[in-house]
Amino acid sequence: MKLREIAHSRTGDKGDTSNISLIAFEAKNYPLIVAQVSAARVREHFSELVHGEVARYELPAIGALNFVLRNALGGGVTRSLALDAHGKSLSSALLDLDIDPDVAESNESKEGEKTL
Amino acid sequence: MRRIRLGAGAGFSGDRIEPAVELAERGALDYLIFECLAERTIALAQQARRADPSLGYDPLLEARMRAILPICAAKGVKIISNMGAANPLGAARRIAEIAAECGCRGLRIAAVTGDDVLELMRARNAEMEETGGRIADLGDRIISANAYLGAEPIVSALAQGADVVVTGRSSDPALFLAPLLHEFGWRRDDWRLLGQGALAGHLLECAGQVSGGYFADPGFKETPDLARLGFPIGEISADGDLVLSKIEGSGGRITEATCKEQLLYEIHDPARYIQPDVVADFSQATVREIGPDRVRVAGGRGSPRPDALKVSIGYLDGYIGEGQISYAGAGALARGRLAIDIVRERLAQTQVAATELRFEIIGLNALHGDRLSRDAHEPYEVRVRVAGHALSRQEAARIGAEVETLYTNGPAAGGGVVKSTREVIAVASAYAPREAVRPSVSFEVAR
């Protein structure tokens, strides 16, 4: 199943840093995204576009994750050569990840997990 | 408990005007707030002001004010906006003139100044966060330096009886926090309330983005009537209770999902959202639907405000040249790829002095690159895009020109060439000690 079926997402930008939220439609699916959408997996998914570290923050109170991607916007929104200089469309790429509906055991650290 | 109603009238400079009019007329508002200043807008405005000293404020200021001033004046709705951009004093004078023409005599318009810290930053030769370089390194390429002011000068303007407050660079949430501080007299070190107020401001500052705009995804996230999207209202009480709603019958929707998306928009560490008035903590916030298009957002907290204010530096950073051409039908993708190979070789052969180049096919890999698009089906039509950065306008223009020559020199049946050259206004961040930044408030009265 695609992540898009259980979660939604929005991208924001500040300079050369992109943040992509990932929000479970239903609280019961929050453990699925915690277990399967790690910072390392997001870094790998965007490896052609993101050249810095990826950090993940957990917000269990709203059933959401927030990914912060450094060196992700072609040197910064104001000077990027990209057609989508803000990286607004990145959320759609995240939602295309495959999710196994049976793997919900958390193997993530609690907060501010980072990967290089 | 008394509640204040804040309406969000704009989420960016070019935003729709009708939803703000609808809010002013039917929102039972106390304040109508327009956030119109993106990161680099103020540098562009500074350039406009240099060309004509009476300008440098938001280009839509006039249209917005003509549409809403008479309604807001009649209903006693106060207006707060950062539409002053690089010239809050000029903006206040123009608003006073428009108010007089609209018959709103006696209307008091406050201008908040002091965010322009170009001389201060030059004198301090401040370091820039992104580049590690210093202000002096930019030489005469620097255009602007504006500190993100907090809520205090706006509170002061309201306390002096302002009907309209127009600022330059302010933190976006501060535009919303200010009326709460003014109305409720929250202590300036009550970090919980200030954090909750910043949360309200953060949710409202992009206007339609919390009420169903930028949310729709057919089949997954249905959102009605986006052509008549209603902008949000934040109802807030003295103890920080916050409910988001919108005008009944307007388009869009306010749900837990729309509020959660906006809650994390442009946030990095949700426990440390650094504002001039508070370091806000949204990490424990809760979002609960309490009725149709009514959502309660609670649990915003905070810790003490930072000692330094963020400063946005605008500077000239060369030129971007670009060219595009389309191919369609059988073999379109192969011809598009051939076109790219030809332009790449030509730019090298003719020694175009580009510092960075980008080649892509719109419809295939332009937004997400080759890796994410590797399994895509071949599109019926493609658009080749070549963009490059150069230090001079002439060199940048050669990039689009080389794409244009594909008409008679490139693959078969290419059409619709567009080429452009634009100057790059880049933005970097620096910091200034709070005490070195001195905001002030002055008044214009409509006569």
Image (cartoon, coloured by chain):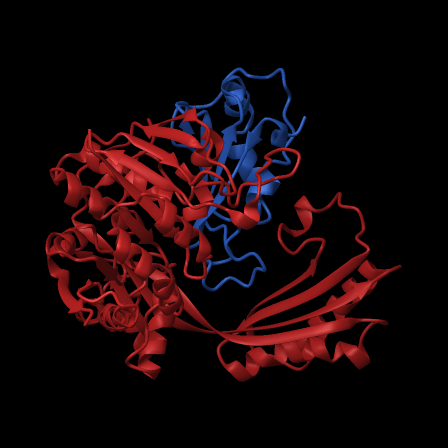
For the residue pair B280 and A15, the one nearer the viewer reads as B280
- State which quadrant residue B216 falls in: top right
- State which quadrant residue B442 falls in: bottom left
Quarter that holds the C terminus of chain B: bottom left
> Could you tell me which residue is drawn at 17 percent across and 38 percent down?
B304
Left or right of residue B213: residue B24? left
Left or right of residue B214: residue B446? left
Q: Residue A65: x and y, percent?
A: 46, 31
Q: Is residue B19 above or below residue B298?
A: below
Q: Residue B410: x and y, percent?
A: 80, 75
For the residue pair B399 and B179, the one nearer the viewer reads as B179
Quarter that holds the N terminus of chain B: top left
Q: Is residue B251 above or below residue B162?
A: above
Q: Residue B438: x and y, percent?
A: 12, 61
Q: Give the number of callouts.
A: 0
Q: Colour of chain A?
A: blue
